[in-house]
Amino acid sequence: MKKLVIITGPQGSGNHFFSRVFSTHPKVGGWKSLLDKYWVPSDEEYFAKYWVNPEELSEKDFESYDYWLANVSCPFFYDGVRYIPKIREFAEKAQSLGIEVQICIIVRDQNINSEQQKRVRGEVTLPVAMHYYQNEIIGNGFKVHFLDNEAFFLHKNYYLKWVSQLLDFPVDYDNPDVFKFITEDPNKKYVKYVDKYWLDDEVWYGIQSKDQRNV
């Protein structure tokens, strides 16, 4: 049976990155143009038109590979128009074609994700994505997993190996091309040093008291 992993996440959560990771494996059909470019418009993703018109999806779209990766952010842009992707309908159509479907929702720190959206899009669309996932995807009969942005940048290929085993899906986690275009943790630019926090004195007092007791 052919297998399809649908990766989705709020805008700015890491859709391009995780799509590149999964599409790197030679046995996986997916967003192959991302292997040579850091960023590609969302309406150039292999399955892009089907997020708007999922009823047009057919067996021909799955002919070349046994494993497939599909990606869409929520919301996403297609031909310059913003849409809420029809992920549920897309998944149901793929299942009707005999494809085994799993859905992976990307998780990124919600505060950083919101700042990313404000910087790039000028507005926060995180609530839109959360409403869709919680009402249309989670708990609606699909195999749903969560891809953790922070877990990858902390554990790297060890995390990807675990994801591959969890999904029973090929991930080329030892291929250095997985880390192509990555120079640092993307959260780094949003993290600022905190000079003082109200709990600091309590913590230091507790540490000092314990040290004195051990003298």
Image: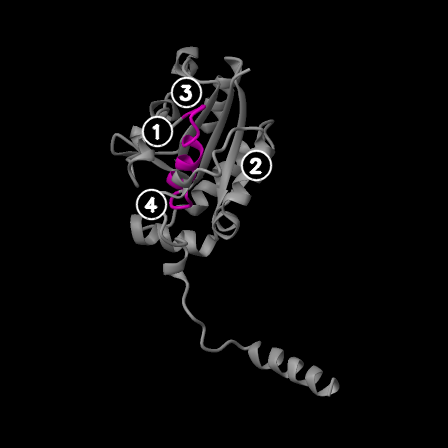
Q: Which residue is mark 1?
A: 32
Q: Dots 2 and 3: beta carbons under 8 Å? A: no
Q: CA separation, marks 3 and 1?
A: 21 Å
User: Amino acid under label 3?
Assistant: Pro
Q: CA separation, marks 4 and 1?
A: 15 Å
Left/right placement of residue 208 relative to residue 150 reads right
Q: Is residue 22 above or below residue 64?
A: below
Q: Which residue is mark 4?
A: 181
What residue sits 54% from the left and 40% below the top? 146
Q: Which residue is mark 3?
A: 54
Of pointers 4 and 2, the one earlier in the residue sequence: 2
Quarter placement of the N terminus: top right
Of pointers 4 and 1, the one earlier in the residue sequence: 1
In the image as oriented, which residue stretches furthest toward the left? 80
Q: Is residue 35 above or below residue 208?
A: above
Of pointers 2 and 1, the one earlier in the residue sequence: 1
Disc 4 crowd, CA 10 A, few/some/many (<14, 14-19, 20+): few
Q: Secondary structure at mark 3?
A: helix
Rendering quarter of residue 163? top right
Query: Which region shows up in magenta?
Result: 11-29
Of pointers 4 and 3, the one earlier in the residue sequence: 3
Nearest to viewer (mark 3 / mark 1): 1
User: Amino acid under label 2?
Assistant: His
Q: Secondary structure at mark 1?
A: helix
User: Amino acid under label 4?
Assistant: Phe
Nearest to viewer (mark 4 / mark 3): 4
Disc 1 crowd, CA 10 A, few/some/many (<14, 14-19, 20+): some
Please tell me whether residue 77 belongs to the stretch shown in magenta.
Answer: no
Q: Secondary structure at mark 4?
A: loop
Left/right placement of residue 141 relative to residue 112 reads right
